Image (cartoon, rainbow, N blue to C red):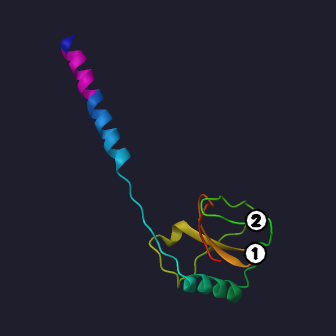
Amino acid sequence: MRRSLFSIVTGSVFLASASLASAQTTTSTTTTWTTDQGTAITAYSASQKYSSFNDPALRPDVGMALPGTVTLYSLPATIKIQDPDQSSYTLINDRPVLVVRTTRKVVHTWE
């Protein structure tokens, strides 16, 4: 009985330690976006004849999920980021907006 109880307590402590360690480990990648990149995305969109989603009531903010009616585009090859397959962009009210492709959440906007 003592061995069983000791084994259960030891296992619980081990699992709790592993959970705590994984909860404290975070990885973040910060990308600094420049005005030139916004200009390049706008120029690329014009060359591809992509249209802007125009709705004066829609003011995209970082963290906001865009509605499914907004068309997302792949980033131009000239925009170099760590995981280009994770990101997309769109044009809202003629301004480029960078989003996470899977969640449609806004990552960056250019004014």
Disc 2 residue type (three-letter):
Leu
Task: Examine the residues drawn in magenta and state their main secondary structure.
Answer: helix
Q: Eyeballing the image, is 22 above or below 16? A: below
Q: Quadrant of residue 12?
A: top left
In depth, the one of 98 and 48 nearer the eye is: 98
Q: Which residues are magenta?
A: 3-11
Q: Residue at x 61, y 60 (%)?
A: 105
The reply to whether the C-beta atoms of the residues labelled 2 and 1 are less than 8 Å apart is yes
Nearer to us in this view, 60 or 77: 60
Q: Which residue is mark 2?
A: 58
Rendered-image quadrant of the N terminus: top left
Q: Which mark sits nearer the N-terminus, 2 or 1?
A: 2
Where is residue 47 shown, x and y percent of the image? 68, 89
- How far across and down, in percent of the image, does residue 33 sit? 52, 77
Total residue callouts: 2
Q: What residue is disc 1 on?
A: 93
In the rendered view, tell whether residue 32 sits above or below residue 27.
Answer: below
Residue at the image position 56 percent from the left and 86 percent from the top:
36
Query: In the rendered view of the protein, which quadrant contains the C terminus?
Result: bottom right
